[in-house]
Each structure stands twice: as C-alpha cells, then as structure tokens.
Image (cartoon, grey):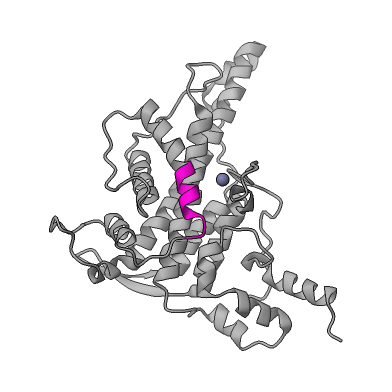
C-alpha cells in the first residue's frame, strides 16, 4: 500500500509551466508537470483494464500503463544535447564567437529535444488510451458514409463526436487556444495539405490536431529547425509552445476517455484506502471520484500527489472539538 505522499516537481515547471496569463480560465490550469502527474495518479488509482484486439492478436491494456507514460512526461526535465561532442580535439582553440555558437546550439537542440520527447511520451499515453476504449466504438451507430474507422485513433474521435464522452472542464477553451498555434504551424511548415477529419470546434477537433502532429513527429516530418539565433528566422517559440500545449490537450483527452469508460476504482491502492480509518482517508475518498477525471487539470484544494499530507495538515488547522 502506498500511503507516502508523492512529492514531485512541486515547485518546478518542466515544459510549459504555469501559464502566465490574466485569462480567468487559463490561470486556473495547473502547471503542466503537475497536470500530467495528477492524471497519471488518477489512472493508477483507477486500476482498470480492457482487452484490445488489432484483428491479429489480443492483449490487455491497463490504465496504469497510460499513467506511467504521463508520469514519465511529468518528470522529464531536460534532454541534454551537447554540440561540443562532435567538435573534435581542436575545439579548445576556438575563438569566443565560435564557442558561443556551439554553446547556443547545445541549448537550442536541448530545448527542442526535450519538448519533442515529452510530446512523444504523452502521445504514447494517448495511443494506449485509444486502445483502452476501442471496444466501445461498436456501441455507436455506423456513419452515414458506411465507412467504419480502422485505427484506434479515428475510432476514438468518432466516439467523441457521437456524444457519449463528457469532455474535461474548459476543454473547448484550451483546444481553441491550441488551434491558434496549430494553424500557425501548418501555415509555416506544412509540406502537403492536411485535412482535418472533423468540423472545427467539434469535440474531436483537438484530437485530430494531435493525430496529425503525432504523425509528423513519428514520420520525421516535424521540422527540426536550425538554431534561429544564428541561422534563419524560424519561430522556435511557436513550435515549442505547440509541442508543450499538445501535452496539455492530449492529457485532457485521456481524462475524458478514462472518465467516460472506467468501471470504478479497481486498484489495490484505492481499496487499501477504502479499508483505512482516518479523516485524511475520508477526504481522499470524497474527492477521488470518477467525476474528478474531468477536473484533474485545474488547481484546487485536493491533489492526488499530496492528498495524505494535505489531509493531515487540514486536520491540524481545524481540530475537532
Ligand atoms: Zn484562457
């Protein structure tokens, strides 16, 4: 049983960090690492599994594994690229200007690699989530075109647009912000026309944007831009924001799917808490409900990563009389 609270990156903001904004919705979002970790913990406590078949083989998909990918993304701070590693023995003789360039390249490609890696981890969580819910696709009507989606990603999108999936709180606001970055990305970098398989603003809009980005990254089409401080005028900030914001949007979809298609909390961790006595455990059970899936990204008095210490602290603040 895991009663020790998990203290992880509490004051750090790997990646996007806390949005610096005056928007009343965005200012309620948890820092990205905290958001990813909260969703990871929720998937762990759910402890659900489902059978997934790709037509050739069948395997068991577990929410813990979805959470493991999200936790890995939450804990990722930096991928280190060292441009000096390929500069040879004469590097020590470089003048200051050349040395500055090599140092700058190290920083540029480290930042880029970090954002790409975090995106890949979240994309893996999302892919596993698609497989977790794939069998529910049979419950919705066949589309008027008569064409059934083949991939788990497109099946998941169809489930969203058919209506049985409640979206996370403020989902539309976060996705509309994402669309601004995504449209700018396509305008500047697309090699071929990309077709969104949905209406803009549809429940699956964000998922289709992520699907296209994931394919660009997986197929090596996502631009690996040179260091804009020395070469070209590439909009590095937009690309890094796009990758980090994709992690936010992807996790919102994980939340919606596991929120809609879970069978209640089945993990040993959760049942151990059900059998425990104490105000902190009662507080946990009152807050860690299936409905919490839709607000894991929002700041609030309850947090799965720190529920034990927070629960004990609230008892000391308001002793029983
Ligand atoms: Zn906002």
Observer-nearest of 124 and 247:
247
Q: In this view, does 113 lie to the left or right of 278?
A: left
Q: Give me the residue at 55% from left, 56% from top.
A: 36
Locate residue 222, reporting x and y percent.
38, 34
Q: In which quarter of the image is residue 151?
A: bottom left
The overriding secondary structure of the stretch rendered in magenta is helix
Can you give x and y, in whole percent of width and height, for residue 138 in the image? 23, 69
Q: Which residue is drawn at 33% across and 30% down?
A: 190
Magenta segment boundaries in residue numbering: 168-177
Q: Does the magenta stretch include residue 169?
A: yes
Q: Which residue, as the protein is rendered here, is positioned at the far left? A: 146
Q: In which quarter of the image is the C terminus?
A: bottom right
Residue furthest to the right: 321
Q: Quadrant of residue 97?
A: top right
Q: From the top left corner, tell me how far across and down residue 269 is, in percent.
A: 57, 78
| Residue found at x 26% / y 32% | 193
Q: How many labels does the image show?
A: 0
Residue 1 seen in the current view = no
Magenta includes 156? no
Quadrant housing the N terminus: bottom right
Residue 114, compared with residue 1, is above or below; it is above
């Amino acid at each position: 049983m895991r009663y020790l609270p998990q203290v992880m990156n509490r004051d750090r903001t790997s990646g996007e960090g806390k949005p610096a904004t005056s928007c009343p919705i965005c200012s309620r979002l948890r820092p990205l690492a905290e958001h990813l970790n909260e969703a990871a913990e929720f998937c762990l406590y759910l402890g659900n599994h489902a059978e997934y078949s790709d037509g050739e083989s069948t395997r068991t998909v577990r929410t813990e594994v979805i959470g493991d990918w999200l936790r890995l993304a939450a804990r990722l701070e930096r991928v280190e690229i060292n441009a000096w590693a390929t500069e040879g023995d004469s590097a020590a003789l470089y003048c200051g200007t050349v040395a500055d360039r090599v140092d700058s390249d190290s920083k540029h490609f480290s930042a880029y690699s970090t954002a790409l890696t975090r995106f890949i981890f979240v994309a893996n969580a999302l892919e596993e989530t698609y497989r977790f819910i794939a069998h529910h696709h049979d419950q919705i009507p066949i589309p008027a075109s008569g064409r059934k989606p083949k991939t788990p990603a497109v099946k998941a999108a169809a489930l969203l647009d058919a209506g049985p999936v409640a979206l996370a709180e403020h989902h539309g606001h976060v996705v509309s912000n994402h669309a601004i970055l995504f449209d700018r990305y396509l305008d500047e970098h697309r090699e071929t026309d990309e077709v969104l398989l949905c209406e803009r603003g549809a429940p699956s809009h964000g998922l289709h944007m992520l699907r296209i980005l994931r394919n660009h990254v997986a197929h090596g089409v996502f631009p690996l831009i040179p260091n804009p401080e020395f070469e070209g005028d590439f909009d590095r900030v937009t690309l890094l924001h796009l990758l980090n914001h994709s992690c936010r949007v992807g996790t919102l979809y994980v939340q919606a799917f596991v929120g809609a298609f879970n069978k209640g909390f089945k993990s040993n961790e959760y049942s151990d808490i059900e059998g425990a006595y104490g105000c902190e455990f009662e507080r946990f059970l009152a807050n860690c409900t299936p409905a919490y899936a839709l607000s894991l990204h929002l700041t609030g008095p309850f947090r799965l990563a720190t529920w034990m210490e927070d629960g004990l602290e609230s008892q000391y603040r308001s002793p029983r009389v």
